[in-house]
């Protein structure tokens, strides 16, 4: 796989990320994708499990910001409900939204991780800025039609296999 498309870490879900190890690696901020990373596509409400995970994130003093390509109304409503900063209509993998998120959190590329479910948006965008990238499996099969097309391309790029981590552990 092309290096810029390779995540530093691949896990099943956000719940499999060792937050202590991220902090030990020097991470201070998490840029989080919304749809199919934190909740299923267009799912309006956070699950109890997600709220508990976000509380765990806070105990490690990690700052968080949702960066989503979804529309403002959805992203802002969701982020307000869970108390996390957010940037909507991000146009990932463009750098601007990632940089804006780091400014909001007061972090830099060397201490920020990106967590998302898509190689061509989350991982590519994070790698372009040399962020620590973590790929998760999508939470649900139901997705935006455009994402379904990109998923086919992702499978071609990774040869039908799950992406491999570079050996890093979070």
Image: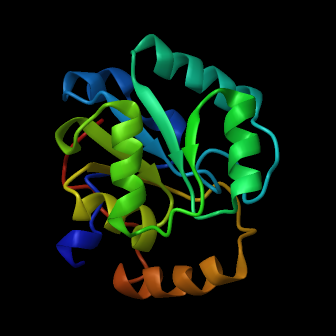
Give percent across and percent down for residue 70. Answer: 65, 63
Task: Tell me: 32 left or right of 27.
Answer: right
Quarter of the N terminus within the rendering: bottom left
Q: Is residue 86 above or below residue 164?
A: above
Q: Nearer the viewer, residue 79 or 103?
A: 103
Q: Quadrant of residue 54?
A: top right
Task: Tell me: 13 left or right of 79.
Answer: left
Q: Nearer the viewer, residue 73 or 135?
A: 73
At x 23%, y 58%, the residue is 129
Q: Is residue 87 above or below residue 20?
A: below
Q: Can see residue 62?
A: yes
At x 75%, y 36%, the residue is 46
Task: Tell me: 11 left or right of 70.
Answer: left
Q: Is residue 153 above or below residue 109?
A: below
Q: Can see residue 10?
A: no
Task: Tell me: 88 left or right of 91.
Answer: right
Q: How many numbered markers are drawn?
A: 0
Q: Quadrant of residue 122?
A: bottom left
Q: Going by the picture, which residue comes out furthest to the top?
A: 59
Give percent across and percent down for residue 141. Answer: 71, 67
Q: Quadrant of residue 19?
A: top left
Q: Going by the picture, which residue comes out furthest to the right?
A: 44
At x 46%, y 82%, the residue is 155
Give percent across and percent down for residue 16. Answer: 47, 36
Q: Is residue 63 above or below residue 148?
A: above
Give percent across and percent down for residue 7. Answer: 30, 59
At x 41%, y 36%, the residue is 104
């Amino acid at each position: 796989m092309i290096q810029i498309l390779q995540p530093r870490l691949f896990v099943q879900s956000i719940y499999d990320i060792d937050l202590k190890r991220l902090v030990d690696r020097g991470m201070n901020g998490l840029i989080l994708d919304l749809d199919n990373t934190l909740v299923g596509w267009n799912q309006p409400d956070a699950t109890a499990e997600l709220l508990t995970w976000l509380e765990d994130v806070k105990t490690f003093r990690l700052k968080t910001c949702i960066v989503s390509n979804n529309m403002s109304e959805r992203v802002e409503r969701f982020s307000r409900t869970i108390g996390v900063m957010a940037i909507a209509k991000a146009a990932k993998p463009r750098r601007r939204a990632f940089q804006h998120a780091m400014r909001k959190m007061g972090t830099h590329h060397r201490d920020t991780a990106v967590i998302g479910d898509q190689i061509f948006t989350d991982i590519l965008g994070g790698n372009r800025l040399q962020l620590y990238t973590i790929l998760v499996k999508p939470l649900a099969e139901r997705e935006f039609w455009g994402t379904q097309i990109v998923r086919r391309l992702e499978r071609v790029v990774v040869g039908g296999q799950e992406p491999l981590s570079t050996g890093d552990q979070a």
